[in-house]
Amino acid sequence: MDQRMMEIFLDVQGDLPRQGPGDDASTLRALSLCDGLPEAPRVLDIGCGPGAQTIALANALPDAAITAVDTHAPYLDRLKARADDDADRITTQVADMTALPLAPASFDLLWCEGAAYIMGIDAALRAWRPLLKPGGCLALTELVWLTEAPPTDAAAFFAEEYPAMRGAEAVAALFEDAGYAPRGHFTLPDSAWWDQYYTPLAARLPEMERKYAGDEMAQAIIEMTRKEIAVREKFVASYGYEFYVARKSSSQAV
C-alpha cells in the first residue's frame, strides 16, 4: 500500500474505539489462559494500534510493565492519552513488527490482536519467539475459516484480501511447529466485530464519501470497506478471528 493510500485508509478508520475486531472480554479470556506469569510481568503488545487491548491488559495486570509498539505514531499518542493512571507503566515505541529493536528473552508475555497477518503468522511466530523468556506466553488473533467449505463469494473476497487465510485448526498446528506449546484457542464473538469496530466504521463512511468526493482512490477504499462489512453480515458463520494462546516450548533453543 503506497503512502497516500495508507493515509486515506487511516483517515477512513478515523478515531474508532478499535482498529479491528476485539473486545475486553476476549482479551481477558485469552489472558486467563496465560497461567504462570510472574507477579510483575514484562509485556510486549505488537501492532497495538490505539491500544484498547493494551489498556485492558494494564488494568488486569496492575504490576506489569508494558511496551506497546506500532508503526503509526498517532496511534501511540492516542494510547498514551487514554492510559491515565497506567501511563507510567506503558512505554510506547514506533517500531516495525518485522524487525523489533528489542533484546532477546526480555518478555514474559507477547500480545498481538489483529496484526500478525501484516507479516504473516508463520513468520511472526518464528520472529517473535526469541523475545520471550523461557516459558513465556504468546497470545494473538488470526483471521481463519470456520468451515471446511467456505461459500464461493466469501472465498473469492478473501482470495483477494487475505489469500493466506487458513482454517482454525491448521493455524493451531503452526504453533507447535514453531516451538510453542498450545494453551488453547477460541473464536471471538460476533459482537467483537460490531460494537467497537464495524458499527462506528459504517456510520463514518457517508462523511468520508463527502470529504473525498471526486477522489477515485479514496472512493475505492470506501467502497471496499463497505464490501468488507457486507461480507461479514452475510457470511458470519464462515469465518472469524481466532484467539490463540501458547507457551514458549523448552524443546527448542532461544
Image (cartoon, grey):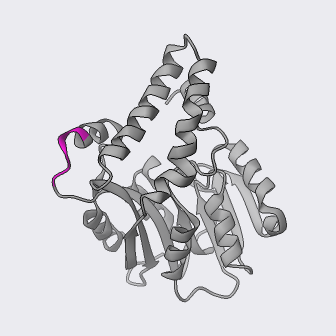
Drawn side of residue 253 relative to residue 160, left or right: right
x and y, in percent, of residue 90 in the image: 75, 65
Could you tell me which residue is drawn at 52 percent across and 81 percent down?
32
Task: Say left or right for 238 vs 71.
Answer: left
Q: How many marks?
A: 0
Q: Is residue 235 visible?
A: yes
Give residue 10's quadrant in the image: top right
Look at 31% across and 35% down and name the residue there: 160
Question: Which residue occupies 77% across, 61% down?
Answer: 83
Q: Note whether 179 is above or below 124 in the view shown.
A: below
Of the pair 65 and 151, the residue shown nearer to us: 151
| Residue 155 percent location from the top left of the image | 23, 43
Is residue 165 covered in magenta? no
Image location (x, y in percent) of residue 37: 59, 85
Say if 36 sits above or below 93 in the image: below
Quarter location, residue 189: bottom left
Q: Residue furthest top?
A: 214
Taking the image as drawn, is residue 131 in sight? Answer: no
**Along the viewing direction, whichever of 40 and 103 lies nearer the viewer:** 40
The location of residue 214, given as percent across then percent down, is 55, 10
Residue found at the very far left of the displayed protein:
149
For image coordinates 26% across by 67% down, the residue present is: 169
Residue numbers of the magenta segment = 149-153
Depicted 224 relative to depicted 122: above or below: above
Magenta segment: does it hold 150?
A: yes
- State the predominant SS element of the stretch in magenta: loop
Which of the pair 141/69 is nearer the observer? 141
